[in-house]
Amino acid sequence: MEANLKVEKPRVRKSRPRTSFENDLTEKLQGLKKPLSSYNKDPNAFYSVRSIEGWVSNIYKLLTSMGYEDLSLELLNNNKKIREYVVKKYDKLNTRQALYNSVIMIYRPEFLLNKFSQDVLDLYILARNSIAIELKKKVQPNENQKEVLDKKTGITKEDITKLMELLKSQSVFEEDIIHRQKYMLYLILLIYSKYQFRNDIAVMRVIKESSYKKLEEEQISGNNFLVIGKKKMTFIRTDYKMKGVYGKLVDDITDKELKLALGLWLHDGLKIYEDPQKLDFTYLLSQDNGTPISRNNLSQILSRETKKYLGRPISTTLLTKIYDTTPSNLEVATTEDLNKIKKQATIRGHSVSVRLNHYTNPNN
């Protein structure tokens, strides 16, 4: 039965109008091809609109926050001033890395013509790479991961289940969502207890099955969907880390609890949209004002909220390890064991070898 999506008082989503600077730059970047690599073997592959809009938004926010009013890409030539500002303004290394990456993707000779400087670009690249080194130092060794997975004092599946029960009890009353953010956290944890994706649901869109069937292949490519049919719901992903190797991934949702949770979310949790009767292509996860949740936002929400409730921050990677089904002794594994490993590897979007080397729970 198709989810009932009617609401009585939809709230209007408010957003800042895009400037001509942003629109012009977005249009230029849409012709930018991806470089050939082990992940991209298609010489005609282009960057997604979502990625481009993210870079443009970062550049706009950076330049305007520095006080510039008459915006142009030539301002990026003031690299020393910009790099010093980024260091002073932003404490988080991930934020600085994202800003530098946006500058690097946009600072191009075809846009700046004779104003382009390879030396300037190299300095931005150096700044970004230095942050990558600092981030690597911070995660090695990963003491939090050791603590979370500790056999005696760590976080277990039972702990996650209790947290989900608490969040559901605090966010639902008489089949209505009364606390949207808590319910969204419950839904996120419930999804990852069944499907150990990466951060792919952060950019996942909701679409009716009838509408999905009308899409061209190029409209499907580069997007992740929750497809809503009359009798079933399905996760379909073409935007994930190893998409160049494994292609489109399709997971039919068979778990009753998850289907009911998603049904309530579609009916009550997405009231924030301008017209909730037309959910096609709206984001599955979003802030209360309708702003989509990025992959980085999802990591931050999980980390912040699980630390609040469980005492330690949990990531999608840690959830993958907590819900790992790999037996402790692979030498005597059964066919059923192997099929479970294969299924979890496929859901995550990697090989069995990668799963065994990087995503197993050492305490199984």
Image (cartoon, helix red, strand yellow):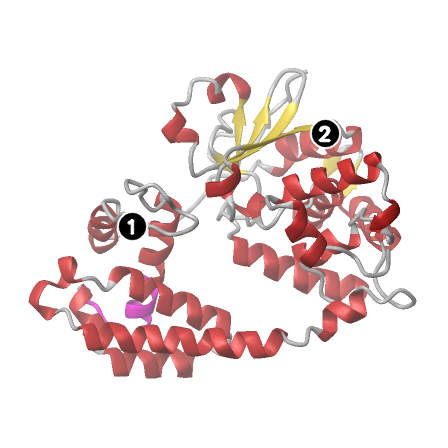
95 relative to 297, above or below: below
**Looking at the image, can residue 191 be seen?**
no
Name the residue beneath numbered marker 2.
Answer: 259
Q: Residue at x 73, y 67 (%)?
A: 145
Identify which amino acid the numbered label 2 is placed on: Lys
For the residue carrying disc 1, how many other residues have a C-alpha within 10 Å: few (<14), some (14-19), or many (20+)?
few
Q: Residue at x 67, y 64 (%)?
A: 304
Quarter of the picture holding the N terminus: top right
* Circle on res. 18: 1
In the foreground, 100 or 317:
317
Of 73 and 362, the residue lying toward us: 362
> Which sits earlier in the primary sequence, circle 1 or circle 2?
1
Q: Residue 6 occupies which quadrant of the picture?
A: top right
Q: Residue at x 69, y 57 (%)?
A: 357
Q: Are marks 1 and 2 in contact (CB under 8 Å)?
A: no
User: Could you tell me the amino acid type at mark 1?
Assistant: Arg
Residue 133 picture location, percent across and down: 49, 77
Point out the stretch of residues depicted in magenta. Answer: 60-70
Q: To which quarter of the image does residue 228 belong? A: top right
- Disc 1 is placed on an element classified as loop
Callout 2 secondary element: helix
Does 104 lie within the magenta span?
A: no
Which quarter of the figure is the C terminus placed in?
bottom right
Q: In whole angstroms, how far apart are the C-alphas of marks 1 and 2?
A: 37 Å
Camera sees residue 296: yes
